[in-house]
Amino acid sequence: MADALLVMDMQNGIVERLGDRATPLMATVASALRAARHHAVPVIFVRVALREGAPEVSARNQSFATLATSNVMSEAASSTQLHADMAPQPGEVVVTKRRVSAFSGSDLDVVLRAKNIDGLILAGIATSGVVLSTVRQAADLDFRLTVLRDACADADDEVHRVLMDKVFVRQAAVVTTDEWAASLDGPA
């Protein structure tokens, strides 16, 4: 059994929406990255971006149709680039998705199968977006799941709390980054 840390949507345009809350979140995600790298847990970064002209977006898609008319989510836009604090190290994969879930419109499943990954540790923005969608899809794909409670954030703190305490616990272990990092060291 092998795990991978998914760092999802930690890109400029999404991180900046958190305002002052971004700094502590970025520090927590950086801590998760250090623990994963120290214990040779593969790290996979996931970002959302659209091709030039957004050919993958239907006018029927309420969430993405508005984005398709601007270039704010284009692959080359500054807003879709990983935040400087989240720079991948050599050998770490960056997956580009076209929808909310880390699996939708990306090659994430192919990458995971190639690396024999069957467990995912999730961190990202937003809890009600990429984290929720990825938990649901990954559970349906039979991945073992861990959600890092303090390495995820949402614009709505109450939505974050309800998802962590009432929804995710049905399909995933929900732990703090420190708890997960300690588990990598084995039993005390």
Image: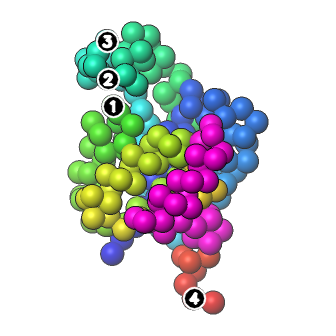
On screen, residue 78 above or below 171:
above
Q: Which residue is mark 2?
A: 61
The residue under label 4 is 187
Name the element at disc 4.
loop
Q: Pick whichever of labels 1 and 3 is earlier in the sequence.
A: 3
Determine the main secondary structure of the stretch shown in magenta. helix
- The amino acid beneath tag 3 is Gly
Q: Secondary structure at mark 2?
A: loop
Q: Residue at x 40, y 64 (%)?
A: 171
Q: Residues within 10 Å of mark 1 (few under 14, many from 20)?
A: many
Q: Is 174 included in the stretch rendered in magenta?
A: yes
Asked if the residue under mark 4 is in contact with the one under mark 1, i.e. CB atoms within 8 Å, the reply is: no
Mark 3 / mark 4, whichever is N-terminal: 3
Instruction: List the residue tagged with mark 3.
Output: 53
Give the CA separation, mark 2 to mark 4: 47 Å
x 64%, y 47%: residue: 158
For residue 16, above or below residue 41 = above
Image quadrant where residue 105 sits: top left
- Residue range highlighted in magenta: 153-181
Mark 1, residue position: 98
Q: Is residue 93 magenta?
A: no
Instruction: Please indicate, yes or no, whether residue 119 appears anywhere in the rendered image.
Output: yes
Label 3 crowd bin: few (<14), some (14–19), many (20+), radius 10 Å: few
Identified at 66% across, 45% down, the residue is: 157
**Colour basis:** rainbow
Q: Is residue 42 above or below residue 188?
A: above
Disc nearest the viewer among 2 and 1: 2
